[in-house]
Image (cartoon, helix red, strand yellow):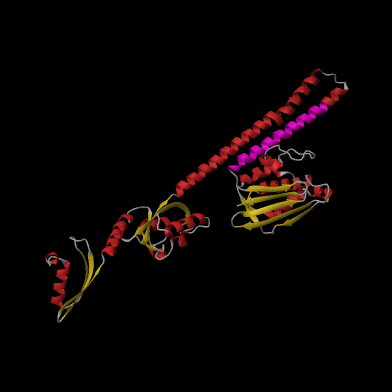
Amino acid sequence: FPRISPSKFRRQCEEAAKEGTAKHFEERYAYSGRAYSYSVYPSEEGLSVFFTDITEALDTREELEKLSLVASNTTNGVVISNKDRRVEWINEGFTKMTGYSSSEVLGKLPIELLHHDQTSIEVLNSVREQMAEGRPVAFEILNRKKNGEDLWLAVEINPIHGEHGELQRFVTIQTDITALKKSELSLSELTKDLYRQNSDLHQFTYIVSHNLRAPLANVLGLARLLSVGDRGAAIYDEAIKNLKKSAENLDVVVRDVNTILSIRNSKLNLEKERVNLAEVLQEACNSLQEALCKCGGNISIGIAQDMCVSGSKAYLHSIFYNLLSNAVKYRSEERVLQVEVNCYHCQEEGTVITFKDNGSGFDIHKAGDNLFKLYKRFHSDKNGRGIGLYLVKTHLEAMEGRIEVDSQPNKGTRFSIYLK
């Protein structure tokens, strides 16, 4: 066999015969590209040689060694897992990125360690399906580091197939995009804030063009009338009364504007505190005690004494007061007012506070987008300025909360407040 005369196989056979010891080794032949694993055993009769073709296994191992060399020198996280998705190897970049060492992740599914409460189940299910089919997949997902910090990753998973197309393992490359996601979130918040400011601008334009102009025009007109009128005439006293009323209306609008501006400005520097909800609700009830006694209404409170949220006590008092005040103001004349206030906590929504009454209600579909807008009213038979619900929504937004409403005419209204 002239091709094997200079080979490792020949040298190992000669050493086995000379030393009388078994030899185990591997060798790849350049002329054919094939690789074999040998076991050579010496005996009195000569040498017994057992060999196995390991070309495919050696090719895979060499590819992994090359990949490992590259992966070890990249800042991205690299994970090599078997066909069952269990980790076989990780690079230093993965450890630096997640905080988990090789010994902590070997043999495990990455999601077992990195799972976040807000990890998208839909994304995970889609990834599993594509991996099971042996297809490459790319996605973004929110994970959690070993120290508990959020970790946004851009992930690319590529399947490795054998010579006959069978799935052997997966190579996963992970890129930390946490900073990018934070920037996107900041940009999204900025966009929302600009939208709110633009909405405020329209609101203030409306105030100036309608609510301020009307009483101001009345004041100016009455002032001109008084300047030329006869002080002894009956119309003079009537004009004085109307002038006073117009000035009071003007003052109310100016105070409304100041209130709205103060909320918008304080949102930027709102200092949250731990607020006991039962205490604040009781204070709001006390403020409305006289009105409740006059109408014979009853408020049922279902809030635990130790239930607390992070927010502004003043804002929460204003929210509770306005919702209860509306319940009293827009009660039904056909039955005694009953208001139920309940509170519970759920993982998805945070703290939920509900206000349910049996009042006159309103057509929520007719109200549409105007429900929480400034100076919008839905009960023409009741006095009101149309600012209460606007303040409720604005206060909640300042505390990063939201409100939902459900109402039916002559049946009642239910408000649901959500606070994280």
| Residue 26 seen in the current view | yes
Magenta span contains residue 100: no
Start-end of magenta stretch: 240-268
Question: Where 31 falls versus 47 (above or below)?
Answer: above
Q: 30 or 285: nearer the eye?
A: 30
Residue at image point 65% right, 56% down: 308
Magenta span contains residue 254: yes
Residue 294, image x, y percentages: 84, 48
- Tell whether 49 sits left or right of 64: left
Question: Where 5 falls versus 22 (above or below)?
Answer: above
Question: Where 226 falls versus 322 (above or below)?
Answer: above
Residue 352, located in which quarter of the rendered image? bottom right
Q: Which residue reaches farthest front?
A: 164
Residue 362, image x, y percentages: 74, 44
- Tell whether 234 sits left or right of 39: right
Task: Pick the quarter of the image with the N terminus.
Answer: bottom left
Residue 315, image x, y percentages: 66, 46
